[in-house]
Amino acid sequence: MILTVTLNAAIDRTYRVESFRLDAVHRPSACWIVAGGKGINVARTVKRLGGEARATGILAGHNGRFIAGSLRAENIRGSFVWVRGESRTCIAAVDPVHRTQTEINETGPTVPPSAAGRLIRRVRRMIEAEATRYLVLSGSIPPGMPNDVYARITEEACHAGVHV
């Protein structure tokens, strides 16, 4: 089983906008809205390829509930640490005419320092309970999260014999 960690999950909104220009009003010809963040995208890909993946990370607010619900709808099991605030939204405008993509990514919620310890304990429990063989750590670190959080999670996983 593969466990993915997404510290800064998002709602990804992608708009198809032919001939996108700055300082102009556009009407998208299509829109896709999905739960996102690098680790969540990995879990989705593993699942679609027939593998087994679980997701964990940090979620907040209404957007966090949307993300958790979207994962359930895709049959991706997740167990997240919840914090105050709002999980971010990331917007992409894809222009198929000029073959460009413009992205606007929110920063994400400011997480309390205690969230790192809670997440590390969550990862440890999931590794033990889920027969985890691989751990994927990917994506940005939200404001307030210690910069060494990935190193601390890696240490826990390696101690348990999990490939990172």
Image (cartoon, rainbow, N blue to C red):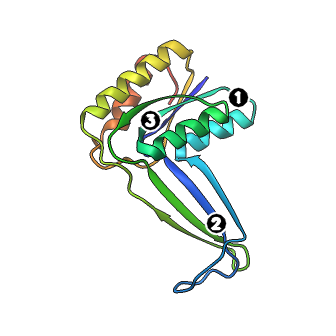
Q: Residue at x 66, y 76 (%)?
A: 27
Q: Please tell me whether mark 3 sits on a helix, a strand or a loop.
A: strand
Q: Which residue is mark 3?
A: 57
What label does residue 73 carry, if any?
A: none
Q: Residue at x 66, y 30 (%)?
A: 75
> How many residues crowd around disc 1 within 10 Å: few (fewer than 14), some, or many (20 or more)?
few
Q: Is residue 97 left or right of residue 153?
A: right
Residue contact at pointers 2 and 1, CB within 8 angstroms: no
Is label 2 or label 1 in front?
2
**Nearer to us in this view, 72 or 55:** 72
Q: Please tell me whether mark 2 sits on a helix, a strand or a loop.
A: strand
Of callouts 2 and 1, which one flags the residue occurring earlier in the amino acid sequence? 2
Q: Is residue 128 left or right of residue 50?
A: left
What label does residue 51 carry, if any?
A: 1
Q: Which residue is mark 2?
A: 15
Q: Position of residue 43 (x, y in %)?
A: 61, 36
Q: Position of residue 113 (x, y in %)?
A: 24, 37
Q: Is residue 105 above or below residue 163?
A: below
Query: What is the C-alpha distance between the residues marked 2 and 3?
Result: 26 Å
Amino acid type assigned to the residue bearing label 2 in the image? Tyr
Q: Residue at x 62, y 61 (%)?
A: 14
Q: Is residue 155 above or below residue 23?
A: above
Amino acid type assigned to the residue bearing label 3 in the image? Gly
Residue contact at pointers 1 and 3, CB within 8 angstroms: no
> How many residues crowd around disc 3 within 10 Å: few (fewer than 14), some, or many (20 or more)?
many
Query: What is the C-alpha distance between the residues marked 2 and 1?
Result: 29 Å
Amino acid type assigned to the residue bearing label 1 in the image? Gly
